[in-house]
Amino acid sequence: MATARRAVAVLAAVLVAAFTPTAAQAGTDDASTTGDIGIMAAHKSPFGCGKTFYANNWSPGHNPSGAIDWQSYGDDAVGGETVRATASGTATFSTTLSADVGILAYGNYVTITHGDGTKTRYAHLATMVRGAGQSMTVAQGTAIGTVGGTGGDYAPHLHYEQITAGGALDTSPTVEGVTVSLGQKKAVTSTNNCGGNPYSPAEVCGGGFSVIDQKGLTGGTVYLLYNSGNSDNCVVTLKSTNLGAATAVSAFLEPQGGTRTTDSGSYTYYAGPVKRSAPGVCVKWGGSVGSSTYTSPFEHCD
């Protein structure tokens, strides 16, 4: 079992790139756990499932250079379209109706800080779901506003930026796996908000972890993951129902001969990650969604 376990984990470590969560969502947790939080994911389109719009990286003449203007495509008008987070994080809502952000007039705009310190910005919004100066935790696909032309005499469009952790603008941003470099204009179809939990167990646990076991629950699935690099185990319970609503969910992990660590609370998407090192011993793991629970025997002995 140990050999097979390590082989699976090593292969997944090569294939999976993920970021470790950094901030807990409201809930009742152990101090050692985190619950639902903003973590980085590959960027999707800022629009709803199946929507197709032009991503236009104007060059020259766009300010700042490298930002994308999302514009109407065919008979699909972008004006008034719901704008959604392209990746999870913490959204901050702002209004600048004059050119007081550098030399830019963003109008109503939202800045989302992602789990790895990168940011995205969504500007010229007609409406926002929160008032200026407020913030909220968002998942990939969360609605943050609607497309407009605020901040100047603009035709309705969405001004969109991807910003590195160092503060530089990415001049060749990628959404839906499509890179739009300077001077390019591409039609991009959204897979954002197409249903299902926007998180994966590997994203929640972080880089180097791979799924080695799982158990279906009514309303979700509890996963056991393993990191061959440091012999750490990780448990996360992902919801499949009541997504986006805070409901009871939990995850736990117990090395044989040691204490149990549990994360439980009212979460919108998942409980965990619960991480424990257990070199040379078996682990008991499990979790719950509502009244549906699972507890394993001691198994997966390293």
Image (cartoon, rainbow, N blue to C red):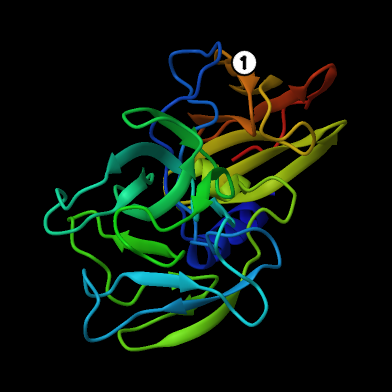
Element at label 1: strand
Q: Is residue 85 visible?
A: no
Q: Is residue 72 left or right of residue 215?
A: left
In the image, residue 97 above or below residue 185: above
Residue drawn where x is 53% and y is 42% of the image: 204
Q: Nearer the viewer, residue 25 or 126?
A: 126
Query: Whole-percent x and y of residue 263?
Result: 58, 19
Q: Kindly identify which residue carries mark 1.
A: 265
| Pointer 1 local density, CA inside 10 Å: few below 14, some 14–19, many at least 20 | many
In the current view of this chain or complex, which residue is farthest to the front? 153
Q: Is residue 297 visible?
A: yes
Query: Whole-percent x and y of residue 39?
Result: 46, 44
In the image, residue 11 above or below residue 195: below
Residue drawn where x is 65% and y is 73% of the image: 76
Q: Is residue 257 left or right of residue 39?
A: right
The number of numbered discs placed on residues in the rendered structure image is: 1
Q: Nearer the viewer, residue 67 or 164?
A: 67
Residue drawn where x is 67% and y is 53% of the image: 193
